[in-house]
Image (cartoon, rainbow, N blue to C red):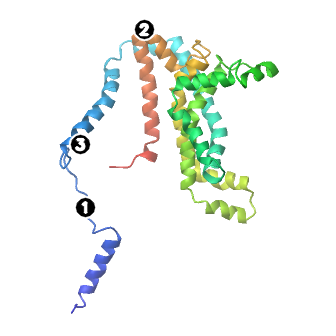
Amino acid sequence: MTSPTDAPDRSAAAADTLRGGPRRGRVRKGFGQGVPLPLLVPALLGLAFLVLPLIALLVRTPWHSLPDQLTSPEVWQALKLSLLCATAATAVSLVIGVPLAWLLARVEFPGRGLVRALVTLPLVLPPVVGGVALLMALGRNGIVGQWLDAWFGITLPFTTTGVVIAEAFVAMPFLVISVEGTLRAADPRYEEAAATLGASRFTAFRRVTLPLIAPGIAAGAVLAWARALGEFGATITFAGNFPGRTQTMPLAVYLALQSDPEAAIALSLVLLAVSVAVLAGLRDRWMTAS
């Protein structure tokens, strides 16, 4: 027969079961303790494989001549063009990518899976192939570009606008994926409540949905901007490599590597610093405290 004093103990045990087990203090093990050797060794090799090239870049950086390298007119010209084009490409991605993400997340229509696959295709498509595809579509003899040239006199390849288009083509999927995921996680009942109060669907999107998904939009925009800043293959194929007009930082690195390796290392260091800054900016969203 159970005594009355056993009831609280049983209640506490039941509560622990519902919580997933009794609370325990966090056990911190030393490095390597409890980790199987067949997992630890390849993990360390993978870490070395990813980090060693970055360390080599820092070690081989010509720190004594770095100020002169980074203050040369060619570097500033390429950096200014890269920042301008990456920002413009991100703006284009926001204007057309956020509505596209909303369409994929909120609207049921035939072939939605195919559309999503096509939207994310530039993520896995080789950038050079993307540049060739842009030439076939928007080049002077492309299926759309020939009409732009004949009707409006607009030629996109080998122009600064062509750089923006190439960067937006490869960067926008990052924004769409991020915003679509945020939209799927957001509760649609807030939009439904706004609709019951008389708001149109666009008003509900503008006044309710956008504030809810603002962090996802910001994260996607930063990723798109970083991807646009580092774009090389589609840019050089569709826009060429003309200093002051289409030569961005990655193209300047490629050109400098053939004649001035120290300048190429200095330019690479700038892009590395930008990448680290982007990861630091997204840390609170993607990473959890250990």
Helix, strand, or loop for circle 2? loop
Q: What is the distance, in whole Å, between disc 2 and disc 1 at their CAs?
A: 56 Å
Q: Earlier in the sequence, mark 2 or mark 3?
A: 3
Q: Residue at x 60, y 34 (%)?
A: 90
Q: Which mark is residue 25?
A: 1
Residue at position x 19%, y 47% in the image = 30
Asked if disc 2 and disc 1 are in contact, CB closer than 8 Å, the reply is no
Q: Please give the residue where the numbered disc 2 appears in the rendered image.
A: 260
The residue indicated by pointer 3 is 39
Answer few, some or many: residues within 10 Å of disc 3's Cα (few below 14, many 20 plus, some between 14 and 19): few
* Image-based side of 259 in relation to 212, left or right: left
Local secondary structure at mark 1 = loop
Q: Quadrant of the N terminus?
A: bottom left
Q: Where, by quadrant of the figure, is residue 88 drawn? A: top right
Crowding at mark 2 (Cα within 10 Å: few <14, some 14-19, many 20+): few
Give x and y (percent) for residue 54. 35, 26
Q: Is residue 10 left or right of residue 152?
A: left
